[in-house]
Image: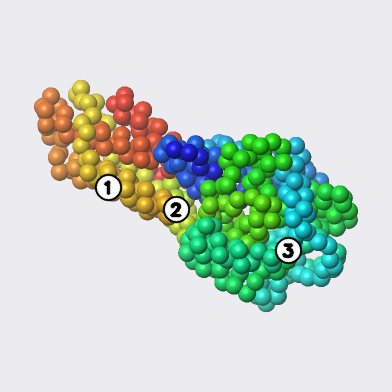
Amino acid sequence: MGKFYVTTAIDYVNGPPHIGHAIQKVWADVIARFYRQKGFNAWFLTGTDEHGASVVRAAEKLNKTPKELADENAVKFKGLREILNLSWDDFIRTSDKKRHWPGAELMWRKLVESGNIYKKHYRGLYCVGHEAFVTAKDLIGGKCTLHGTEPEIIDEENYFFRLSKYSKEIESRIKNNKLKVMPNSRRNEILSFIKNGLEDVSFSRPAKDISWGIPVPNDPSHTMYVWCDALTNYLSAIGYGRNDSWKKWWPCDLHILGKDNLRFHAAIWPSMLLSAGLSLPRALFVHSFINVNGQKMSKTIGNIISPYDLVKKYGTDAVRYYFLREISSYEDGDFTYEKFEERYNADLAKGLGNLVSRILTLAQKSDVKEVKSFKSEIKTTEKNIEKAMSEFKFNDALVAIWQLVALGDKYVDGKKPWALSSDSEEFKKTVGSLLFLISEIGKLLKPFLPGTSEKIAEFAENKKSGTLFPRL
């Protein structure tokens, strides 16, 4: 059915991963698995953004070199693959001189060749947390709205990229959905931002101030700024700058990113691609944030939650389920341990786990084979999942599957198979129908809860009872 190339944003290594990083990876994993299940050749890329002032300063505080800190935290980000059962095909690090640097260097040269890189003196505000220059209108009370810190005043000579040249073209592409931005609220936000025209952006920093990064080709006195370095990872990882293998996967079918990265991916990145003579990504999905007890995660508050700790306490699929069912990808969500345990017990332990246990206990009483029932309900569920996934509404997809769980419970309670003779045809038909139902539920769950899906298949095939989710 063709290819499907999906990426996440790459994460800063100035600290270890928290649940905000983890949830994005889970959402991307579900999409990749869903498309593979449909027969697509899906390629899922993630990675780490390792250069810049934030990493240098974080390393200095810990009395480490930037490379030491990057190596240490990159391992922790890579470890999310195992603990969250992620299926990414590649993990790119921007400090990788063999795989990433050639692509970033080629991108820079292409922008120079197009006449869109120039040098000028600049004085402005710089947010270290964003690794980006900001304007006064981006601030509230003189502070960054996301990081709560005052930006630094930077006065230096930099290379600039002619972003202003592409304002109308980018606006047109987004309006015509040639560059699809989802959801509509983010589409409207970026169109409003572009409406008055884009301003040229700084594309380098003096190496004397930031040496931890990729030197500008033909001018090592400057270090590439984040745009050409980090954004090019989507191309460098698939071979750009090294060979022609990237042509198999480009254009990217879907970039997944947080709302704080919208302007970078919907304005600067497509402008770079147009300047370099490359196709634009087909779609951007811009998700919201996850808070903890109604507050943004912060070291100062002390409410940062490690995905490692969460999985250790509750298990991989329980964590995946909460991220997918409880946290909307369209609006800021909230994590609390109380909500987590409530959702876990109601939907997993007492819901799906209990249904599977009841059916398998009955199946052990006789030689029961699957009976293909509930076809209409299953087909309706498949359609509902397809619609939900086309809009990246993972919670709606799981609601649809749990309607089948509720159907199974209702069917068991109505038929009362435990009151029937295990040798009767009615018993075999009833339990056989239920076996088929949980098998189909397991298949539908595969992109969302792959471990649980495998267990259900194993239990149903061998008619052996097993605990999917012990009650907390």
Which amino acid type corresponds to the residue marked 1 in the rendered image?
Answer: Thr
Residue placed at 43% from the left, 42% from the top? 34
Would you say 330 lies left or right of 302 here?
A: left
Q: Nearer the viewer, mark 3 or mark 1?
A: 3
Q: Position of residue 317 (x, y in %)?
A: 45, 41
Which amino acid type corresponds to the residue marked 3 in the rendered image?
Answer: Arg
The residue pinned by badge 2 equals 392
Q: Position of residue 91 (x, y in %)?
A: 63, 40
The residue pinned by badge 3 equals 162
State how far apart marks 1 and 2 are (Cα). 18 Å
Q: Which is more toward the observer, 421 or 387?
A: 387
Q: Position of residue 257 (x, y in %)?
A: 57, 54
Residue placed at 57% from the left, 51% from the top? 281
The residue pinned by badge 1 equals 380
Residue placed at 41% from the left, 50% from the top? 389
Which amino acid type corresponds to the residue marked 2 in the rendered image?
Answer: Phe
Q: Circle 3 sits in a helix, a strand or a loop, which is it?
A: loop
- Quarter holding the C terminus is top left
Residue placed at 78% from the left, 43% from the top? 67
Local packing at callout 1 (Cα closer than 10 Å; few below 14, some 14-19, many 20+) is few
Task: Tell me: residue 467, above or below residue 74.
Answer: above
Q: Earlier in the sequence, mark 1 or mark 2?
A: 1
- Do the residues bearing badges 1 and 2 touch, measured as CB atoms within 8 Å? no
State how far apart marks 3 and 1 are (Cα). 50 Å
